[in-house]
Amino acid sequence: EPEVTQTPSHQVTQMGQEVILRCVPISNHLYFYWYRQILGQKVEFLVSFYNNEISEKSEIFDDQFSVERPDGSNFTLKIRSTKLEDSAMYFCASSGSSGRSYEQYFGPGTRLTVT
Amino acid sequence: GQSLEQPSEVTAVEGAIVQINCTYQTSGFYGLSWYQQHDGGAPTFLSYNALDGLEETGRFSSFLSRSDSYGYLLLQELQMKDSASYFCAVRDSGAGSYQLTFGKGTKLSVIP
């Protein structure tokens, strides 16, 4: 069964450093998302991406964040200058069509720890 | 904005039935989804309701009442492996809006 994959599974970085989180969505999906989940809290939307551009972004997704689809398979989230409060689990997700965006397939997540 | 309310914790006995409620207040509404998340795992899609009524998928059913801004997830014949957190999530009705807004989750503990 196709699945979303993410690398690395765990990233430790120092405050102020840049990190890039990588995702490979399901191959025939067209819509891509990043969410984050602070430990013990709810899943929060960051950004959605379609047709090589951002569709929507939340208030969390400020100028420190950027997304890119550098080739036909990868989808990346970059945090330019990490803060302690960026420590969270970051999930990539994809969905096949706009009509089925309620059914999003999530990757296993990258646990980001900022020290 | 969107807000969703669901109980924080529920405990039920193996083999029993449990209902997890979700009420929502949204500026726009397209449908209500349910996701399951085991500790340390990724959210997994369970069910979706766009219209009023009951949707059944095996042991899991989901219900929606749009007029009451209310839905629930019903889990039957509970198994130990059903111990997980369950999130309701709404999709906004705005054009080009595909994001899901999640509730805070209900932690279900299934006991023998």
Image (cartoon, coloured by chain):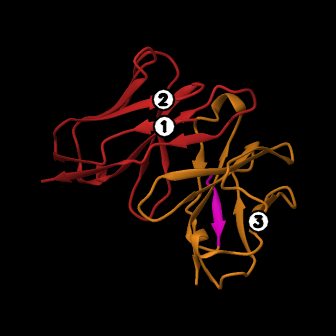
Image marks 1 and 2: residues in contact by CB distance under 8 Å:
yes
- Asked whether, in this view, residue B10 is left or right of residue A46, the answer is left
Residue in front for this viewpoint, A2 or A5: A5
Q: Chain B drawn in what color?
A: red
- Are tags 3 and 1 found on a single chain? no
Residue A64 - label: 3
Image marks 3 and 2: residues in contact by CB distance under 8 Å:
no
- Asked whether, in this view, residue A90 is left or right of residue B57, the answer is right
Asked if residue A1 shows in the view, the reply is: no
Taking B48 as reference, is B89 above or below it? below
Q: Chain A drawn in what color?
A: orange
Quadrant containing the C terminus of chain B is bottom left
Q: Residues within 10 Å of mark 3 (few under 14, many from 20)?
A: few
Query: Which x, y percent locates residue B93?
Result: 64, 25
Query: Which x, y percent locates residue A31?
Result: 73, 43
Which of the marked residues, 1 or 2, is nearer the chain's N terminus?
1
Residue B3 - label: 1
Q: Chain of mark 1?
A: B
Quadrant containing the N terminus of chain B is top right
Is A67 within the magenta?
Answer: no
Query: Which x, y percent locates residue B50?
Result: 53, 21
Residue in front for this viewpoint, A12 or B111: A12
Give the SS element for disc 2.
Answer: strand
- Asked whether, in this view, residue A79 is left or right of residue A12, the answer is right
Q: Which residues are magenta?
A: A1-7
